[in-house]
Image: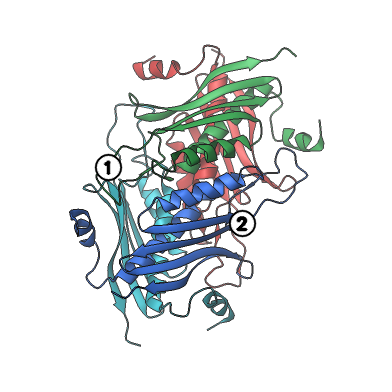
Chain colours: A green, B red, C cyan, D blue
Amino acid sequence: MNDEEDLVKRFFGNDVTDRDRAVFEAGIKLGAIYHQFMGVPLSKRNILTVEKAIEETVSCQPYVESARVKIKPPQDSNSRRYGYSEVSGRNLSVRLVVKYGHVRVFAGMEYVPELNYPLMFIEKLEEEAK
Amino acid sequence: MNDEEDLVKRFFGNDVTDRDRAVFEAGIKLGAIYHQFMGVPLSKRNILTVEKAIEETVSCQPYVESARVKIKPPQDSNSRRYGYSEVSGRNLSVRLVVKYGHVRVFAGMEYVPELNYPLMFIEKLEEEAK
Amino acid sequence: MNDEEDLVKRFFGNDVTDRDRAVFEAGIKLGAIYHQFMGVPLSKRNILTVEKAIEETVSCQPYVESARVKIKPPQDSNSRRYGYSEVSGRNLSVRLVVKYGHVRVFAGMEYVPELNYPLMFIEKLEEEAK
Amino acid sequence: MNDEEDLVKRFFGNDVTDRDRAVFEAGIKLGAIYHQFMGVPLSKRNILTVEKAIEETVSCQPYVESARVKIKPPQDSNSRRYGYSEVSGRNLSVRLVVKYGHVRVFAGMEYVPELNYPLMFIEKLEEEAK
């Protein structure tokens, strides 16, 4: 272990496992994505660029192995000027894979109409044999 | 278990434990705080209100038991107009308690000068006897 | 004029008037409020604190004389956990007064249902006799 | 004038000119960019995508003719994990052109070290002969 990780470990309780760390990091990334990108203006033309920007932005953070972002295209509007949309809990879908130590977490975010809520969840956990 | 939790559970893998859920929620809240409030203009006069707003804002989210936010006051500046500061990773300190099922997580965020990084961490986990 | 304003003036074209500066600053503040606070979690309990935090936050910025923020309370929800709301273009109403030189601008933001859009506008301009 | 613009005009005072509207819109866009994108994680690999996403995002908003965004690359860091940077007032440079009616505004944002402040400014105004 290098000095940097040594320093970081001092902030974590002794009973915190690799699995806890992996799950914690997945939560951080999802909370960050939602609250960072909510409100970004959206049109049919820029949607792919915004998806790619979020993916690359998440992927440069610690412990992220991969990220996949889909934004539901805004509906057609009669308004010429005010008809654009914005990134919100209703149109944002995320999947990401985080790895810490020997644990890999598959997590995501999806709008759930029945809850009227952008739910964040853990789909799967993989623990490699040590 | 009510229908709502039933629906939510379907998004989570079968091997996801209460401990995973609690840790995941703590991560979500910390990632959200940082990316939501970064950039909020800050003066010596509004600092207590901003701290309180962040605390109350976090506390109304699912599974949060309590939240404590401290913002390091901006330094005096010679500039009359442009001397105000803003919420950033360097001045924001958070502690929060999240509880899911029988597991309680004590987590936080602190700027670590040696890393030049606002580190998020888990200080302690408590599992109540079932 | 002090050195600071002297430096700032160099970035502005010669034909930029006090009226332009006042109107420009009003626009900056409204754009900032919307994109800074969108997504802040909202319950009936924290709504007054969030309103106050936005008001104080805007008021510490250059040239702002006063700010008034109203957030429409979230509707009752059947959901115990997921029933909270968040600051959005639909529930945020702002009025602010900006003064630059001898010009005072009364500006605001209001959700306009017919446009499905949070419109920002200038209600009034006052130019003091020099 | 169509119904939409008719409705919008009702929110603006009678003495508000096309020049005011153009300058106001330029301010809105700059305030929005700063407070929307502050805190976006940044590495050498994603910097071009983030610049492009901001440009396209601004360009889909009303009255924007063009936008140019440059982000100063983060410095090399010794830290393997925590060495990434984020969008901030110190590394973000913007130029945009807004047109309302017969008036075109050239505005921008630039970090000014002497002020330790990300200054927003109007470089030029062009009024077309009617």
Most foreground residue, D19 or C31: D19
Determine whether, in the image, residue D111 is placed left or right of residue B49: right
User: What kind of residue is marked 1?
Assistant: Ser
Residue A125: image tag: none
| Residue positioned 66% across, 15% down in the render | A127
**Disc 1 with disc 2 on a shared chain:** no
Q: Residue at label 1?
A: A77
* Residue C36 appears in view: no
**In the rendered image of this protein, does residue C27 appear above or below residue A28?**
below
Q: Residue at label 2?
A: D91
Determine whether, in the image, residue C112 is placed left or right of residue A60: left
Q: Secondary structure at mark 1?
A: loop
Host chain of mark 1: A
**The furthest residue to the bottom:** C130
Viewer-nearest of discs 1 and 2: 1
| Residue positioned 42% across, 20% down in the render | B8
- Where residue A18 appears, as percent x and y from the top left, is 68, 23
- Where residue B108 appears, as percent x and y from the top left, is 60, 37
Q: Quadrant of residue C45?
A: top left
- Where residue A42 appears, as percent x and y from the top left, is 40, 43
Q: Quadrant of the C terminus of chain A?
A: top right
